Image: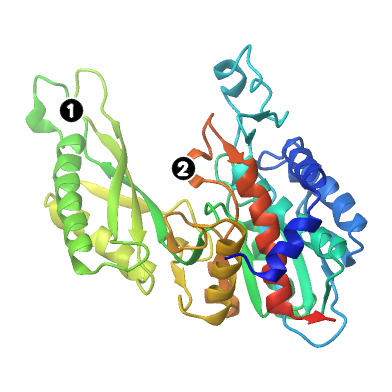
């Protein structure tokens, strides 16, 4: 049964305004590196909401973060909504949808009850819903006792050369540590969850393994050292290691750890192959050490290649909150804030608000592990269609997210009657 607060918010909701905000966000091309385009739009929307302390600052030249807050009218908790402003590329989108309403990846058409476009799910629905939620509280005449803060950062996506190292949130974390940006009591990172609540997420690292032997003419292979043959031994050992990892433990929300070999390149022309590269990604569970896991990978590969004349080198190109990659994170799934948000989602859209684990890595570990601030993922949108030509968000799910976020703001921060 829908509670009184949710009914009040649903009655006050301006559906057209909330959708216009969302579609305008999609209309800003903000492929990683071009975040300033979207940040300018957000600045206008945040200023219209009367946020105080509104600031932008470049984390890299020409690439700004933006943050601001609505200060409460009494004593209450401080809630932060955060999301990344950048999206993945649109390569092939226009060709894929040529001649249809979906052809322009930034046009945000509404088709069959869903808003389409690059960044719709990842994660402009979440950013827009969090801002529209504050506007909804204003329309409903609800004044907050505590503070609602917003921070929108760049460089989360990793598809563009020289980007995707979480430079934006690293800059923000330093500002929180220094006291320049006030610490929240609780954080909602608006990655798409289909309006579930994710209090846990996986960790990861990527390893590129270069195996170097010695080339020789194919007629006298005994003079060479076959790097591809060595890579076969290494991969066989790595697959066995993955099975061992999976058998160790199972997390109730994010499942089992494993590694996935994602690439193999090497070889030459009528000669013993001198060099090849094996690439892999390792999934980690909360509590697992990246350093230990990487050391295990290296020991597994070196143990499989017995020839001391074959050289093996390891590179870790995807450092995030750790030099090797991104750490896993979790908070208490039974925490009162988690239950409160879950209930608000279920009230707004029956069947939503389930407690699940994130099958992806994003930036909540900067809060949970580095800053010691509890954080969850929650927003409209489905990660399964993000980064694809099918990226879209259901209208009713988005609007339910607006209502649920507004209800959670009121319950968590408290209200002034």
Question: What secondary structure is marked by label 1?
Answer: loop
Q: Can residue 390 be spotted in the picture?
A: yes
Circles 2 and 1: CB atoms closer than 8 Å: no
Residue drawn at the location 53% of the way across and 65% of the way down: 321
Q: Where is residue 280 in the image (x, y as percent from the top left)?
A: 33, 47
Query: Could you say which quadrant of the image residue 394 lies in?
Result: top right
Residue drawn at the location 82% of the way across and 50% of the way down: 42
Q: Where is residue 281 in the image (x, y as percent from the top left)?
A: 35, 50
Instruction: State the residue in front, 9 or 333.
Output: 9
Instruction: State the residue in front, 254 or 92.
Output: 254
Asked if residue 6 is positioned above or below residue 79 in the image, the reply reads above
Query: Could you say which quadrant of the image residue 205 lies in?
Result: bottom left
Quick one: quadrant of the N terminus?
bottom right
Instruction: State the residue in front, 293 or 349.
Output: 349
Quick one: quadrant of the C terminus?
bottom right
Task: Find disc 2 in the rendering and name its residue.
Answer: 384
Label of residue 272 in the image: 1
Query: Could you say which quadrant of the image residue 104 lies in?
Result: top right
Label of residue 117 in the image: none
Q: Where is residue 284 in the image (x, y as percent from the top left)?
A: 35, 63
Question: What secondary structure is marked by label 2?
Answer: helix
State the separation of the CA atoms marked 2 and 1. Answer: 42 Å
Q: Position of residue 45 (x, y in %)?
A: 86, 52
Q: How crowded is mark 2: few (under 14 residues within 10 Å), some or many (20 or more)?
A: few
Asked if residue 43 is positioned above or below residue 375 in the image, the reply reads above
Residue drawn at the location 53% of the way across and 51% of the way down: 194
């Amino acid at each position: 049964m829908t509670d009184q607060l949710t009914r009040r918010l649903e009655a006050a909701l301006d559906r057209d305004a909330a959708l216009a905000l969302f579609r305008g966000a999609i209309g800003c091309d903000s492929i990683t590196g071009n975040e300033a385009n979207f940040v300018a739009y957000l600045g206008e929307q945040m200023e219209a909401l009367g946020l105080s302390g509104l600031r932008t600052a470049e984390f890299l030249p020409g690439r700004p973060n933006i943050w601001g807050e609505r200060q409460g009218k009494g004593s209450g908790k401080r809630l932060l909504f955060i999301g990344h402003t950048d999206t993945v590329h649109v390569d092939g989108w226009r060709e894929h949808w040529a001649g249809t309403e979906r052809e322009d990846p930034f046009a945000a058409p509404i088709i069959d009850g869903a808003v389409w476009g690059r960044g719709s799910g990842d994660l402009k629905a979440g950013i827009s819903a969090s801002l529209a939620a504050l506007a909804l509280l204003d329309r409903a005449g609800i004044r907050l006792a505590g503070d609602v803060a917003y921070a929108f950062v760049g460089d989360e996506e990793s598809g563009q050369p020289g980007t995707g190292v979480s430079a934006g949130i690293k800059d923000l974390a330093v500002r929180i540590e220094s006291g320049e940006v006030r610490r929240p009591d609780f954080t909602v990172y608006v990655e798409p969850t289909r309006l579930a609540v994710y209090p846990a997420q996986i960790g990861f690292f990527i390893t590129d393994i270069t195996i170097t032997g010695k080339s020789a003419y194919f007629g006298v292979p005994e003079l060479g050292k076959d790097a591809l043959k060595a890579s076969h031994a290494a991969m066989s050992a790595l697959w066995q290691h993955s099975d061992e990892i999976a058998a160790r433990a199972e997390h109730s929300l994010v499942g089992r750890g494993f590694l996935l070999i994602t690439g193999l390149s090497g070889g030459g022309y009528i000669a013993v192959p001198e060099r090849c590269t094996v690439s892999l990604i390792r999934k980690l569970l909360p509590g697992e050490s990246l350093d230990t896991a990487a050391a295990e990978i290296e020991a597994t590969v070196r143990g499989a290649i017995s020839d001391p004349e074959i050289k093996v080198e390891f590179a870790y190109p995807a450092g995030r909150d750790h030099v090797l990659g991104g750490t896993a994170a979790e908070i208490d799934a039974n925490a009162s804030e988690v239950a409160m948000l879950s209930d608000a989602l279920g009230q707004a859209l029956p069947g939503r608000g389930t407690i699940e684990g994130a099958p992806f890595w994003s930036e909540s570990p900067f809060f949970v592990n580095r800053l010691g601030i509890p954080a969850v993922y929650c927003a409209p949108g489905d990660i399964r269609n993000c980064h694809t030509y099918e990226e879209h968000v259901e209208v009713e799910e988005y609007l339910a997210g607006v209502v649920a976020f507004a209800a959670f703001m009121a319950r968590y921060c408290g209200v002034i009657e």
